[in-house]
């Protein structure tokens, strides 16, 4: 194995590259042959898509207004929506229809065989009272299992569930409801997050990790936990307390044509498949206060206990605007993130910090491998376009170094960003086999940072008009 590459690239005035245009100075010859062949990657995508089949539902329709729901933005419709879902499930499945109107509600729990269909103009306006999301349910909070407030829309252990239509799930979180739990004067989530992590580290059984009333761990807007055959199609989600769409330990998930409009909240990730297998995310538009799409697999001790990777996923034809990252792996990577394919996405915003981001640290562990990104167009980014770092949260030592290797990025184009690459391995845990092929970065103003990387291959890569192959 070759020695890690630790040299830092230096850009001269005006963005020209030092050392005769060589990005790293020395190194090996261009290694296009070492890149994963596109045909092989496309074959893997085809295999994944063959396994992904959206659920089908019987031709039975249950209008929530026939169960007492009123779309007047005042009436509490929780019981009516629940009754419609139970009736549909009990009959063998079908569609629960929410017609146009504004429906106030607490927690909505989906059951097997039910498609919750929001017609155009329908809005579920979720209560701002935490008591509306009790009793507590089994959940995963930032990669650690516990019992906490229900997600606003929640399902556990169900099959063939969907939320479809052109309507909206409005979490109605704001600076004085939910988001104020993230910091500032007490009470806030800080002590509860610390307690939960300590419980997991010391092996406290999950059933004894009970939060909810009197605690301050924010719920997701939509969480599907241990479900199979999931479809989210056409809906808009808005202003979640934290992560917007959070499938956990699910199999066969299709998320298409969804709009995530939640740019102002803290930790407001758009779509976070965690420890899920066979996932398709396509034709979505995402603007968030955190990562747009983030693949996760559990955190630290609890992630290693569950030990289920995020694996076999395709993200294609999506548009990302505001966010800390466009497509991200981490930082909860303890179960591994593997075989993720990104195709034909557009990303741009003065508030989009990075396009492709992998983040972990030596407390996390897990393997992150075979991440394959092709044909992504970035207009504007606010930080490094591609960031792969193993010092997330400034943690540089630990007993569980992650294994990050075989990351391929091809035909990425960038109109403007401060930095093209920020690649930070650790001295005893280098990044390995990072390959960029036919990529162009324009209007770059700051030097790349490349530390502790083995087998970095740059083939037909251009920065500010200068070819920088190694």
Image (cartoon, rainbow, N blue to C red):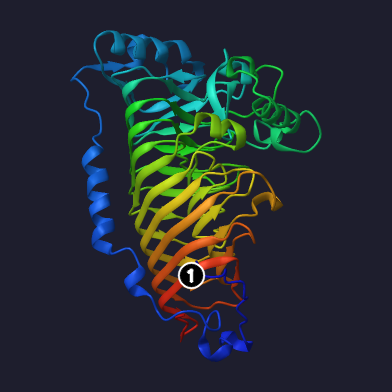
Q: How many marks?
A: 1
Furthest residue in direction front, as rendered: 1
Compared with 242, 290 (above or below) is: below
Please indicate, yes or no, whether residue 148 appears anywhere in the rendered image. no
Whole-percent x, y for residue 135 in the image = 57, 12
Compared with 26, 66 (above or below) is: above
Residue of label 1: 456
* Front residue (pair 276, 115): 276
Compared with 111, 289 (above or below) is: below
Q: Is residue 255 left or right of 79 when viewed as pictured?
A: left
Q: Is residue 89 left or right of 172 when viewed as pictured?
A: left
Label 1: few (<14), some (14–19) or many (≥20) C-alpha neighbours in 10 Å: many
Compared with 277, 436 (above or below) is: below
* Front residue (pair 25, 464): 25
**Residue 310, picture quadrant:** top left
Furthest residue in direction right, as rendered: 185
Whole-percent x, y for residue 230 in the image = 33, 30
Q: Is residue 394 left or right of 438 when viewed as pictured?
A: right
* Front residue (pair 104, 432): 432
Q: Residue at x 45, y 45 (%)?
A: 337
Q: Residue at x 50, y 19 (%)?
A: 107
Whole-percent x, y for residue 74 in the image = 52, 19
Disc 1 secondary structure class: strand
Furthest residue in direction bottom, as rendered: 20
Whole-percent x, y for residue 42 in the image = 25, 56
Please indicate, yes or no, whether residue 407 appears anywhere in the rendered image. yes
């Amino acid at each position: 194995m070759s020695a890690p590459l630790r040299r830092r690239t230096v850009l001269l005035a005006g963005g020209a590259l030092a050392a005769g245009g060589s990005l790293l100075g020395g190194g090996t010859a261009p290694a296009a042959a070492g890149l994963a062949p596109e045909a092989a990657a496309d074959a893997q995508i085809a295999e994944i898509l063959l396994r992904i089949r959206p659920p089908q539902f019987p031709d039975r329709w249950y209008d929530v207004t026939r169960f007492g729901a009123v779309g007047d933005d005042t009436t509490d419709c929780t019981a009516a929506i629940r009754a419609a879902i139970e009736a549909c499930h009990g009959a063998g499945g079908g569609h629960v229809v929410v017609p146009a109107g504004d429906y106030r509600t607490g927690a909505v729990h989906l059951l097997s065989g039910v498609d919750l269909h929001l017609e155009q103009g329908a809005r579920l306006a979720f209560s701002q009272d935490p008591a509306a999301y009790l009793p507590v349910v089994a959940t995963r909070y930032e990669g650690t299992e516990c019992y906490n407030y229900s997600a606003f829309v929640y399902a556990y252990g169900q099959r063939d569930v969907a939320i479809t239509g052109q309507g909206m799930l409005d979490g109605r979180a704001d600076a004085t409801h939910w988001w104020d739990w993230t910091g500032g004067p007490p009470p806030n989530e800080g002590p509860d997050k610390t307690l939960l992590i300590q419980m997991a580290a010391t092996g406290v059984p999950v059933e004894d990790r009970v939060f909810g009333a009197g605690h301050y761990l924010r719920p997701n807007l939509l969480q599907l936990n241990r479900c199979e055959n999931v479809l989210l199609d056409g809906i808009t989600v808005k202003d979640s307390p934290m992560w917007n769409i959070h499938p956990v330990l699910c199999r066969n998930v299709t998320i298409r044509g969804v709009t995530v409009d939640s740019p102002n909240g803290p930790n407001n990730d758009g779509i976070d498949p965690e420890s899920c297998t066979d996932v398709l995310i396509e034709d979505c538009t995402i603007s968030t206060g955190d990562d747009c799409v983030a693949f996760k697999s559990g955190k630290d001790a609890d992630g290693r206990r569950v030990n289920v990777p995020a694996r076999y996923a395709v993200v294609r034809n999506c548009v990302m605007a505001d966010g800390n990252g466009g497509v991200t792996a981490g930082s909860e990577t303890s179960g591994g993130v593997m075989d993720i394919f990104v195709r034909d996405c557009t990303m741009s915003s003065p508030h989009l910090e990075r396009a492709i981001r992998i983040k972990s640290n030596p407390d996390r562990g897990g393997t992150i491998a075979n991440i394959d990104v092709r044909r992504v167009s970035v207009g504007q980014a606010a930080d490094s376009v591609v960031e792969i770092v193993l010092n997330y949260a400034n943690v540089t030592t630990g007993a569980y170094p992650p294994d990050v290797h075989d990351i391929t990025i091809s035909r990425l184009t960038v109109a403007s960003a401060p930095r093209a690459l920020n690649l930070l391995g650790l001295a005893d845990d280098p990044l390995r086999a990072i390959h960029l092929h036919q990529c162009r970065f324009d209007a770059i103003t700051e030097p790349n940072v490349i530390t502790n990387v083995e087998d970095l291959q740059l083939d037909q890569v251009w920065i500010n008009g200068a070819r920088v192959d190694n």
